[in-house]
Image (cartoon, rainbow, N blue to C red):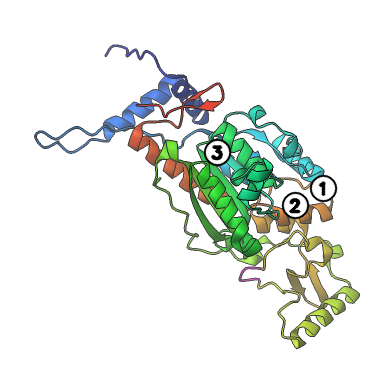
């Protein structure tokens, strides 16, 4: 059989092929042939007379994509998206201790304060990932702002918050997918006004917004409810992109599986601290409150690991024979959060506790990310559009197949 010559291949298609062949360690010819073979196997049943043919588009098992990691922390999103074939083009994290960990784990120091970064300087990307902080949103009357000649609409409502920086980046870069994470009570913060401002801002940017509170207990042995927000550019995916959040795995991990065999005795509580915690819990019980320490169920899941764990470790304590309880070691915290076990902790215990308590759970982010990839595959099968054409940093119309 003679050779095939394909002319006028769009730059975006060539880039996609190059990423795909590198991801699968193939030559360009091997990668293209694998796609053609897949298409040839996908035989269609014979068409009825006068029936219009349906175009079949072959999609690789994994799709190379690019992403940026904003409010990156120690890279929970990066671990997840990199495992799915994503390539990180830009990261941003202001905390210098988190930057130290990020550098040790990924070989690069994230950019600092996002407020000092111009959106145009961020590379074009397919997915914007951000575990952004929740700050109070000050909502003023639009009419008053108009009379003063100030910005109004979502620009006014989000001005002064770190979420506004995400809005500014999205306006300029128009990433096809936004992947955001925050605390569960973001929906109830400030009487629901914060959540309304965020969702309306994203919709006003012409994104389809999907959200769900997910408990990480299906993936790691800890109750950790966080809201995940996934947004799709309406101009790319249409009004109703095929997307659903993941169900938790059938088998729940056990807390005992994350414990070290011989933890250092320095993590055992002093008698004074243990007496204080018991007395504190007793006083709150007498008042009808539920505050107090928590002894972890070794065959179950623990409470939520918080950034304040370094103070006394009271929310997750481990019972010990003939000794007072102990707190988790930083290594156990890493395991509890589902971070890879081969990553060395390069900061103090205090900073490690803070970092893990603030982190995104990589396994949950990966599970949601897999559903995003499924939506990208659906989009490719439906339209043949890789994602979006770009010219001079501005989004253009989707590429026709």
- In the image, residue 141 lies at what x, y percent? 63, 53
- In the image, residue 333 lies at what x, y percent? 72, 58
Q: Tell whether label 3 touches label 2 (CB within 8 Å).
A: no
User: Which residue, as the protein is rendered here, is positioned at the far right?
Assistant: 272
Q: CA distance from mark 3 to mark 1?
A: 30 Å
Q: Which residues are magenta?
A: 298-302
Mark 1 vs mark 2, foreground winner is 2
| Mark 3 or mark 1: whose residue is earlier in sequence | 3
Residue, disc 2 = 355
User: Which residue, as the protein is rendered here, is positioned at the far left?
Assistant: 49
Q: Identify the image quadrant of residue 150.
A: top right
Specify the label residue 246 is tagged with.
none
Q: CA distance from mark 2 to mark 3?
A: 24 Å
Mark 3 vs mark 1, foreground winner is 3
Q: Tell whether label 2 touches label 1 (CB within 8 Å).
A: yes
Q: Residue at x 78, y 70 (%)?
A: 314
Specify the label residue 347 is tagged with.
1
Question: Dot 2: what SS?
Answer: helix
Question: Dot 3: what SS?
Answer: strand
């Amino acid at each position: 059989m003679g050779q095939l010559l394909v002319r006028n291949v769009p730059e975006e298609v060539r880039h996609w092929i190059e990423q795909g062949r590198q991801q699968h360690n193939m030559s360009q010819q091997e990668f293209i042939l694998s796609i053609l073979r897949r298409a040839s196997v996908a035989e269609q049943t014979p068409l009825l007379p006068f029936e219009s043919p349906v175009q079949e588009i072959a999609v690789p098992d994994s799709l190379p994509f690019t992403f940026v990691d904003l409010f990156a922390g120690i890279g929970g999103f990066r671990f997840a998206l990199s495992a799915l074939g994503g390539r990180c083009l830009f990261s941003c994290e202001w905390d210098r201790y988190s930057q130290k960990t990020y550098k040790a784990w990924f070989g690069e120091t994230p950019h600092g304060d996002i407020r000092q970064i111009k959106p145009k300087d961020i590379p074009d990307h397919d997915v914007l990932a951000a575990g952004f902080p929740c700050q109070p949103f000050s909502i003023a009357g639009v009419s008053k702002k108009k009379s003063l000649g100030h910005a109004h609409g979502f620009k006014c409502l989000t001005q002064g918050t770190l979420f506004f920086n995400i809005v500014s980046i999205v306006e300029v870069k128009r990433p096809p997918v936004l992947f955001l994470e925050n605390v569960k009570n973001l929906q109830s913060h400030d009487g629901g006004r914060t959540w309304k401002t965020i969702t309306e801002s994203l919709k006003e940017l012409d994104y389809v917004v999907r959200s769900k509170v997910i408990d990480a207990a299906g993936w790691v042995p800890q109750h950790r409810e966080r809201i995940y927000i996934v947004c799709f550019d309406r101009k790319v995916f249409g009004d109703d992109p095929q997307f659903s959040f993941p169900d938790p795995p059938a088998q729940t991990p056990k807390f005992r599986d994350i414990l070290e065999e011989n933890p250092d005795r320095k993590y055992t509580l002093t008698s004074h601290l243990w007496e204080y915690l018991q007395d504190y819990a007793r006083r709150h019980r007498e008042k009808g409150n539920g505050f107090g320490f928590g002894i972890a169920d070794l065959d179950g899941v623990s409470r939520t690991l918080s950034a304040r764990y370094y103070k006394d470790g009271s929310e997750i304590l481990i019972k010990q024979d003939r000794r007072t309880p102990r707190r988790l070691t930083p290594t156990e915290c890493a395991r509890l959060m589902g971070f890879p076990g081969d990553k060395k902790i390069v900061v103090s215990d205090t900073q490690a506790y803070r970092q893990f308590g603030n982190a995104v759970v990589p396994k949950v982010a990966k599970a949601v990310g897999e559903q995003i990839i499924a939506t990208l595959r659906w989009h490719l099968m439906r339209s043949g559009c890789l994602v979006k054409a770009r010219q001079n940093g501005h989004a253009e119309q989707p590429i026709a197949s």
